[in-house]
Image (cartoon, rainbow, N blue to C red):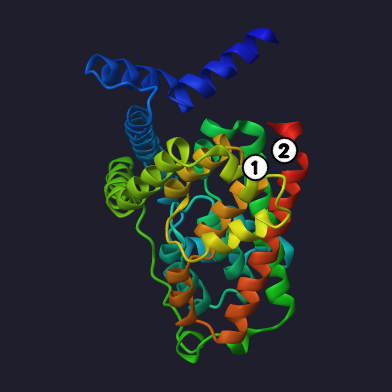
């Protein structure tokens, strides 16, 4: 048992966490005359380490996820979902959302396509919630920073929000709240060409390049913000605003995250810095969920597809789910970290 624990710790710290990279960058910076124990040196070290680590993990993860995703084009996904009914259809849609490495804005065109194809509205919303909030990449990245318990719970609870949200929307019978041009259009059944290994790898590599190009600015911004939080903002301030003393920290973090636009890869370094400074775990995770699921640009895009009533219900369901998850993590933080 001790051997398994040692092997797991090595995998989490040295493979996922890339602690060897942190030590290497520290040695190089010190050799260049930059003191990594000072604020400037520590900020540079944090920026280089987190940027390289996230981009490297991102490339590997998107390659794997995109290869898996090549087996689930929209028409095949529609056929798979069409075999299930009720809450099982919502659950399958939420799980399929985990193999789509998309931010919320990228998920909306797929949501519109599924809705046009005649899939139940609640099913498409389960997909729309889970796709940006939870994916295989988020599981691995969260494991690299927070450990497997937090990562697994984050994914499970994200799926619960997706399934619950989609089921509630289905029960409310809000089909008339979808814009007419989507309801009246119907996707054609186009035979899917079977791809070979080389084709799938080409598709996966194209997705890596496309995703890296799209998210790189947000990763750099996120790492920059994380470096400032980590080395320049006093710990006492973070604890006061987002720690035990503020019972509204979860609500505040979720509200602050909504106007931002980033995917989970861009929020990881900010979350890492906040947690290191004393912010509660639930606060940090609710911030991440708010950014990835309810960003203002994605809500503007979604408004083009649904009417205000349905948009408001969607935002309300997600907000309540995120806040409940945040307080849940706050309550169990000291048992799982």
To which quarter of the image does residue 168 belong? Answer: bottom right
Residue 11 point in image, percent of width and height: 52, 20
Vertical placement of residue 126 versus 95, above or below:
below
Judging depth in this view, the residue of 76 and 226 nearest the camera is 226
Pointers 1 and 2 in contact (CB under 8 A)? Answer: yes
When the figure is inspected, residue 268 is found, relative to residue 21, above or below; the finding is below
35 displayed left or right of 323:
left
Residue at 44% across, 54% down: 263
Q: CA distance from mark 1 to mark 2?
A: 6 Å
Say which quadrant the N terminus sits in: top right
**Residue tagged 1:** 281
Around disc 1, counting alpha carbons within 10 Å, would you say few (fewer than 14), some (14 to 19), or many (20 or more)? many
Name the element at disc 2: helix
Horizontal and vertical percent for residue 118?
55, 78
Where does label 2 land, which residue?
333
The answer to whether 93 is drawn above or below residue 268 in the figure is: below
Residue at 61% from the left image edge and 76% from the top image edge: 121
Q: Residue 31 appears at what percent x and percent y? A: 24, 14
Residue 267 x/y as whole percent: 47, 48
């Amino acid at each position: 048992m001790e051997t398994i624990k040692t092997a797991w710790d090595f995998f989490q710290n040295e493979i996922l966490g890339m602690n060897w990279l942190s030590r290497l960058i520290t040695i190089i910076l010190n050799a260049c005359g930059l003191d990594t124990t000072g604020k400037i040196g520590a900020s540079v070290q944090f920026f280089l380490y987190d940027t390289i680590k996230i981009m490297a993990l991102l490339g590997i993860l998107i390659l794997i996820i995109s290869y898996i995703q090549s087996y689930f084009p929209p028409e095949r996904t529609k056929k798979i979902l069409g075999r299930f009914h009720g809450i099982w259809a919502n659950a399958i849609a939420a799980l399929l959302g985990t193999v789509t490495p998309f931010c919320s804005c990228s998920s909306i065109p797929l949501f519109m396509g599924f809705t046009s194809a005649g899939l139940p509205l609640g099913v498409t919303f389960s997909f729309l919630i889970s796709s940006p909030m939870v994916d295989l990449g988020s599981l691995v990245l969260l494991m690299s920073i927070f450990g497997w318990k937090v990562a697994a719970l984050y994914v499970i609870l994200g799926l619960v929000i997706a399934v619950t949200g989609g089921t509630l929307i289905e029960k409310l019978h809000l089909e008339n709240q979808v814009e007419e041009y989507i309801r009246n259009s119907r996707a054609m059944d186009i035979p899917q060409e079977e791809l070979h290994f080389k084709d799938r790898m080409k598709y996966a590599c194209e997705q890596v390049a496309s995703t890296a190009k799209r998210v790189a600015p947000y990763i750099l911004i996120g790492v920059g913000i994380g470096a400032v939080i980590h080395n320049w903002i006093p710990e006492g301030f973070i604890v006061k605003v987002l720690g035990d003393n503020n019972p509204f920290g979860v609500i505040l973090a979720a509200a602050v995250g909504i106007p931002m636009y980033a995917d989970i890869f861009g929020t990881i370094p900010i979350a890492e810095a906040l947690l290191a400074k004393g912010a509660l775990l639930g606060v940090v995770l609710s911030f991440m969920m708010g950014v990835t699921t309810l960003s203002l640009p994605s809500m503007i895009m979604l408004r083009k597809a649904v009417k205000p009533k349905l948009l408001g219900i969607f935002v309300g369901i997600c907000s309540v789910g995120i806040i409940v998850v945040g307080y849940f993590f706050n309550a169990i933080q000291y048992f799982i970290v």
